[in-house]
Image (tube, rainbow, N blue to C red):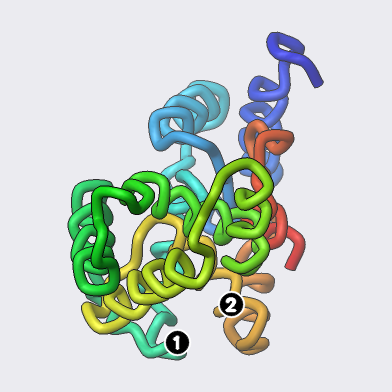
Amino acid sequence: AAAGTGKTRTLVHRVAYLVEQGVPPERILLLTFTNRAAREMLERAETLVPGMGGVWSGTFHHVCARFLRQYGSSLGYKPGFAILDEDDQKKIMGQCVKEHVKQVKDFPKKEFLLKLVSDAANAQRSLEQVVQGYQTKMALDAPLVLAVCRAYGEKKRELGAMDFDDLLVYAYLLLKNHPDVLEAYQERFRYIMVDEYQDTNHAQYAITGL
């Protein structure tokens, strides 16, 4: 539905209605695109029916991080794994470029390389496919670009850290490859609602479809 047609209002009233009908708040999962939106929606629902404290709500990344904090050991990550911010990502990618590239000034910027990695993660495509797509628009040393991007992934693994895109990627793999974990969350969350669902990327869509 178009902007201003009442999508968010509908979700707010649905959450309130479910709780009013006796659904335990902790069995409701509300996914949004900003933490602020999650807070505002719950506050609005609270004004209709008190008792929203147990609803799981937040961005896809926030909720996926909670999944991984609890079950990430199944993928080889400790519960206290670090989440890299943008500066961390640039620093690590910069190190990878210096280690693999002789003529750094002629090589794509680290911001572009991070975009390649992000595009692959969010579209659930291989790095090779993403790089090939850009080769039709610009001259790229594809083997070297792929080597640097893969080195970035390896360094994150060595650090036991994830970037924001990894939260989606690994949460999907966790749920897909570990049926016991998927079943536990399917049993817990009887109602799953997504605000602005039309804006989900492929990775987010895949997670909600499991």
Per the model, the C-alpha gap separating discs 1 and 2 is 9 Å
Residue 163: name its quadrant: bottom left
The 10 Å Cα crowd at callout 2, few under 14, some 14 to 19, many 20 or more, is: few
Q: Amino acid under label 2? A: Leu
Q: Residue furthest top?
A: 4
Label 1 element class: helix
Closer to the camera in the image, 31 or 48: 31
Residue at the spot 54% in from the left edge and 39% down from the top edge: 32
Q: Are marks 1 and 2 in contact (CB under 8 Å)?
A: yes
N-term mark: 1 or 2 = 1
What percent of the width, then of the height, locates residue 57? Answer: 48, 46
- Name the residue furthest right: 1
Question: In what quadrant of the picture does the N terminus appear?
Answer: top right
Q: Which residue is mark 2?
A: 173
Q: Residues within 10 Å of mark 1 (few under 14, many from 20)?
A: some
Measured as percent of width and height from the top left, residue 37 is found at 47, 29
Name the spot of residue 69 as percent of width and height, x first: 35, 73
Above or below for 156 versus 206? below
- Classify residue 128 by image quadrant: bottom right
Quadrant in the picture for the C terminus: bottom right
